[in-house]
Amino acid sequence: MFKGQIISDLIDKRRAKKVDVYTYAGITKATLDNIIKGISIPNCTTIEKIADFFDVSIDEFFEREKHHLNIGHTVNGNGNNVSGDIQLHECQKEIEHLKELLNEKERLIQVLMKR
């Protein structure tokens, strides 16, 4: 669920000016106030622009549980520059395992649909 109050928190924390936020996002002051109060939900473009203004992920504005899959390796990177300690054959084994799980789920769905 979108949490507009986070924008207000970021404004306070970063000592930003509301005028800079709504100008950068291409919206009015009233629109920004309504977003913060939860009266209106911004469209994707506005959320993206506000996230860019504060240099945060779009996910920062949503109340969601974060699920991290840990397969025992570290991988770091941004786009084309990736490094880590995982080997290609380990990735291929993981992919095969996931394919097997997917096939089993599909089989189970078919069984349940026949009931």
Image (tube, grey):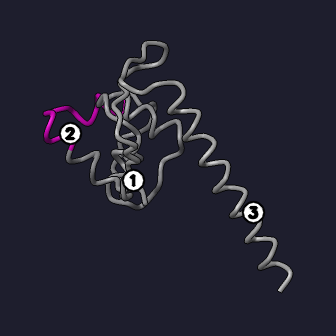
Check disc 1 and give the amino acid type.
Answer: His
**x, y (%) of residue 91?**
53, 33
Relative image position of residue 75 (x, y in whole percent): 37, 27
Residue stretch in magenta: 10-23
The rendered magenta stretch, by its main secondary structure, is classed as helix
Which badge, 3 or 2, is on the more N-terminal residue?
2
- Look at discs 2 and 1 and give the one toward the viewer: 1
- Specify the label residue 11 is tagged with: 2
Depth order, front residue of 62/4:
62
User: Quarter of the image containing the N terminus?
Assistant: bottom left
| Distance in Å between CA atoms under marks 2 and 1 | 27 Å
Local packing at callout 3 (Cα closer than 10 Å; few below 14, some 14-19, many 20+) is: few
User: In this view, which residue lies farthest toward the bottom?
Assistant: 115
Residue at horizontal 41 percent and vertical 61 percent from the top = 39
Left or right relative to 71: residue 92: right
Q: Residue furthest top?
A: 81
Tell me which numbered mark, 2 or 1, is placed earlier along the sequence: 2
Residues at badges 3 and 1 in contact (C-beta under 8 Å)?
no
Q: Are the residues tagged 2 and 1 within 8 Å (C-beta)? A: no
Q: Nearer the viewer, residue 19 or 88?
A: 88
Q: Are marks 3 and 2 in contact (CB under 8 Å)?
A: no
Which three-letter amino acid code belongs to the residue tagged 3? Glu
| Dot 2 crowding, Cα within 10 Å, few <14, some 14–19, many 20+ | some
Mark 3 or 2: the one toward you:
3
| 42 up-or-down from 49: above or below | below
Q: Which residue is mark 1?
A: 67
